[in-house]
């Protein structure tokens, strides 16, 4: 087993980001995938969610991307918008110091906004199949420089009926590309897709329960009657008193009912399901990541694409009807080597689903008793103290990588004939600032954004207040986001 990422001889920029992201030792899937990907081999990887697979493909892709190339070099297809945004964030973090620009494209967001972004230098595009097809059809996503294509959560693409779109996209791509497929399970259709479009793919299989589900996560089930479920749920939250918790339901109605009840009882909570507007869904996701509330009540829409470092408890309020969902839901806890707990409430009617899950995961979920009244009253004071306070996120990866980065906003862009080189030329003349201190530069029609790295933001801001760019005095300020 490889210890540390040093053995891959990654560039300084990537190694520096990995250190800040606290990626110390590769996970099993990373140890298997990174060396093969760096050799540009086609890969079929069977690995559970939560096993670190985004970094498994993200690290080699960021390493191999050529920064100078303006057109996209990597295309990553994901089944959901949430996952697209999560992967985009991960790739941006890993490639932060190499100044890699990753863009997520998905439906329900204005096409024109994405079209504008794609006119900029973009290294990696992450998107849902439908929206990627739209961009290809309208000529806004250029494919001739694509060297890497990743199909993430391929089994889910199949379930959601996207597999034909995925094939159409693959057919448009250059033939000399590297193709990697990641999937928690490998249904026949996914396998056929792999062999049809890949060159001698290397098969990598990370054992399902090879520690992932059981080493770091304690699985338990409580038998309940439907009428007592809500009461027992509240008792569990008091006794477990989690730092953060996701409660999964099978339907939007259950989520709404549960949210109303917990909200009324003073829980710091939010809800997430497919009936919400996309913007609200992202708002809730981000709020949960940064710790604005402690309990997230959600349907399976949240079981993929949420990567929060310290979800300590997952409660399955409803037994999932799809056995695969159990793995995705419980995979939200016990991530990145942390310990987690998954408790399921099962009514007598749900016995057959429970059996199917146990068969699928390969072990029996241990029964536990509902909390006793004395345990609940003993935990009450600590619970009430925690419930009213905001959650402290010790470990927000993106915040760590961005800690020394300031985004500056300039009120001039393409219309004033300003190019990225003009910014680099001017900013590097500031004493104490070098090209290494300049991050991603985005130039729009009438404004531009420049990331300043290494804590030099205020120095550059001050100097640029009295400096012209290409003979033009531009207003400069810290960007709001």
Image: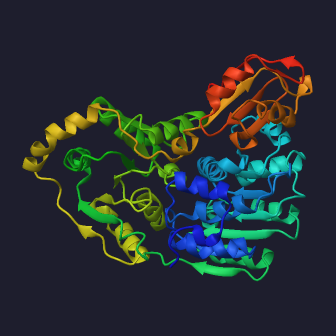
Residue nearer the viewer, 343 or 24: 24
Q: Residue furthest front?
A: 431
Where 288 falls versus 58 (above or below)? above
Where 466 falls versus 448 (above or below)? above
Q: Position of residue 49 (x, y in %)?
A: 51, 63
Q: Residue furthest left?
A: 374
Q: Residue at x 79, y 38 (%)?
A: 117
Side of 206 relative to 353 (left or right) = right
Q: Position of residue 206 (x, y in %)?
A: 53, 77
Q: Position of residue 414 (x, y in %)?
A: 88, 28
Residue nearer the viewer, 376 or 55: 55
Where 228 falls versus 445 (above or below)? below
Where 19 falls versus 163 (above or below)? above
Q: Is residue 477 shown to the viewer in this render?
A: no
Q: Position of residue 267 (x, y in %)?
A: 30, 34
Residue nearer the viewer, 12 or 336: 12
Q: Residue at x 27, y 35 (%)?
A: 387
Q: Residue at x 57, y 67 (%)?
A: 5
Residue nearer the viewer, 338 or 200: 338
Q: Residue at x 57, y 56 (%)?
A: 18
Side of 170 relative to 31 (left or right) = right
Side of 353 relative to 26 (left or right) = left
Q: How is the image coloured?
A: rainbow
Query: Could you tell me which quadrant the C terminus lies in?
Result: top right
Q: Is residue 15 shown to the viewer in this render?
A: yes
């Amino acid at each position: 087993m490889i210890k540390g990422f040093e053995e891959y001889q990654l560039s300084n920029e990537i190694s520096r980001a990995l250190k800040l992201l606290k990626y110390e030792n590769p996970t099993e899937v990373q140890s298997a995938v990174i060396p093969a990907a760096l050799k540009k081999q086609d890969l079929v990887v069977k690995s559970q969610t939560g096993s670190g697979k985004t970094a498994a493909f993200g690290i080699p892709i960021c390493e191999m991307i050529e920064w100078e190339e303006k057109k996209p070099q990597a295309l990553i297809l994901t089944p959901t918008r949430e996952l697209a945004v999560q992967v985009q964030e991960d790739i941006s973090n890993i490639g932060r110091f190499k100044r890699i620009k990753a863009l997520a494209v998905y439906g329900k967001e204005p096409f024109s906004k994405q079209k504008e972004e794609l006119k900029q230098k973009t290294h990696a595009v992450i998107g849902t199949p439908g929206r990627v097809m739209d961009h290809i059809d309208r000529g806004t996503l250029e494919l001739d420089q694509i060297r890497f294509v990743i199909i993430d959560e391929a089994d889910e693409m199949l379930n959601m009926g996207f597999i034909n779109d995925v094939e159409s996209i693959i057919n448009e791509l250059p033939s000399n590309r590297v193709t990697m497929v990641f999937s928690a399970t490998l249904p026949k259709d996914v396998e056929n897709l792999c062999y049809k479009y890949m060159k001698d793919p290397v098969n990598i299989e990370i054992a399902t329960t090879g520690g992932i589900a059981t080493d770091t996560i304690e699985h338990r089930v409580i038998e309940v009657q439907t009428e007592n479920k809500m009461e027992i749920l509240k008792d569990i939250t008091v006794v477990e008193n989690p730092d953060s918790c996701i409660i999964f339901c099978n339907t939007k109605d259950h989520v709404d009912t549960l949210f109303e009840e917990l909200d009324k009882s003073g829980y710091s909570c939010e809800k997430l399901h497919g009936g919400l507007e996309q913007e609200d869904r992202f708002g809730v996701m981000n709020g949960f990541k940064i710790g604005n509330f402690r309990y997230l009540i959600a349907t399976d829409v949240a079981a993929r694409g949420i990567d929060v470092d310290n979800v300590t408890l997952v409660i399955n309020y409803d037994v999932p009807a799809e056995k695969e969902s159990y793995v995705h839901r419980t995979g939200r806890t016990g991530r990145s080597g942390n310990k987690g707990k998954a408790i399921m409430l099962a009514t007598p009617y749900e016995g057959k689903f429970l059996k199917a899950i146990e068969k699928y995961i390969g072990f029996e979920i241990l029964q536990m008793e509902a909390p006793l009244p004395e345990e609940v009253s003993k935990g009450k004071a600590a619970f009430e103290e925690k419930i009213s306070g905001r959650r402290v996120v010790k470990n927000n990866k993106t915040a760590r990588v961005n800690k020394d980065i300031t985004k500056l906003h300039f009120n001039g862009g393409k219309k004033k004939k300003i190019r990225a080189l003009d910014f680099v030329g001017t900013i590097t003349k500031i004493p104490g600032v070098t090209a290494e201190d300049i991050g991603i530069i985005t130039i729009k029609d009438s404004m531009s954004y420049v990331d300043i790295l290494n804590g030099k933001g205020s120095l550059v801001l001050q100097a640029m207040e009295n400096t012209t760019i290409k003979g033009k005095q531009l207003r400069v300020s810290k960007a709001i986001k």
